[in-house]
Amino acid sequence: MQSRGSNVVVLCARIGRQLSEPALGRYLRLLPEDEREAVLRMRRWQDRQARLFGRLLIHRGLRLCGAAARLADLRYGEQGKPYLAGSEVEIGLTHSTDVVAAALCSGGMVGIDVEEAGKVERTVLNKVMDAGLIAQADGWRGPIDATTRLWTAFESIVKADGCGIVLGSKHVQLECDPQSPWPSGTLHGRRWHLAPLSPTDGSFGYVAAARPIKALHIHHLQFAPPRNPSRNTS
Ligand SMILES: CC(C)(COP(=O)(O)OP(=O)(O)OC[C@H]1O[C@@H](n2cnc3c(N)ncnc32)[C@H](O)[C@@H]1OP(=O)(O)O)[C@@H](O)C(=O)NCCC(=O)NCCS
């Protein structure tokens, strides 16, 4: 009998320093034309690299998983959720100041969110979340501040569902054992299983999956020179 759990592959890279024109050109040639144009439409180089690296991570992830899908199959749902047309591999993307990460899962829907620890403002939570949910996080204990944990747990669920912040904001519920960094949540009647990850020093987030996460495989890739070589963990 097939197990109901899922294996999730996470690939991450630092945005790093600005790529040289030849390096940018080489990477862009790996992308289908519409994706290439979307990268080049970004005005800031940091945003161009974040978008580009997200696609490169999916490209590498698909090869790693031995999936038949290609970047040319990449599409976006009504609210912006990325998916691969005709493939059973589900994907999620996130970027923060210096980290880009992609999650791939062939056992059901997946979402991912990563932030620099300590950078999420409490006021952001107050704007979009139910007050009860915020109060609940005050009891969370652990090395990462509760605001970052709550926000990334919330966003990973909203992104796994695909509904986005506006439609999901007041409907996410989290259950958390105060001693455990592994909450689970519900949104729109569906249960989401979470697993924490720290892709780089100082960043933290969650993967949310429709099935219990049996294994989380994390791969670090490097596409650009690091901003601060001493902090690079790739
Ligand atoms: C999904 C959402 C929470 C992501 O917020 P964010 O701050 O951009 O988060 P991250 O940087 O971690 O993730 C960005 C990635 O999320 C993915 N994404 C965008 N919309 C998504 C959605 N509805 N579901 C799942 N993933 C989504 C994209 O692939 C994006 O990466 P890309 O720009 O390279 O394609 C937010 O964009 C959202 O709510 N979108 C839905 C539309 C909406 O409600 N807009 C109003 C926003 S206040």
Image: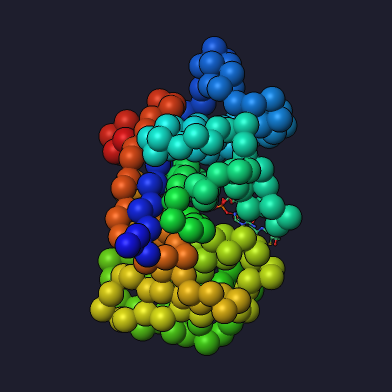
Quarter location, residue 60: top left
At 44% from the left and 26% from the top, the residue drawn is 224
- Identify the residue at horizontal 31%, vertical 48% (top origin): 217
Say which quadrant the C terminus sits in. top left
Q: Residue furthest top?
A: 22
In the rendered view, tell whether residue 211 sits above or below residue 227: below
Image location of residue 223, percent across then percent down = 43, 27
- Give the residue at the far front of this rendering: 1
Q: How is the image coloured?
A: rainbow
> What residue is rendered at 57% in x and 79% in y?
189
Q: Locate residue 24: give its quadrant.
A: top right
In this view, the residue in front, 27 or 118, is 27
Q: Position of residue 162 (x, y in %)?
A: 62, 60
Q: Nearer the viewer, residue 163 or 68?
A: 68
Residue located 29% across and 38% down the image = 233
Q: Quadrant of the N terminus?
A: bottom left
Q: Quadrant of ligand 1?
A: bottom right
Q: Is residue 56 left or right of residue 13?
A: right
The percent coordinates of residue 218 (x first, y second) are 32, 45
Answer with left or right where residue 234 lies relative to residue 63. left
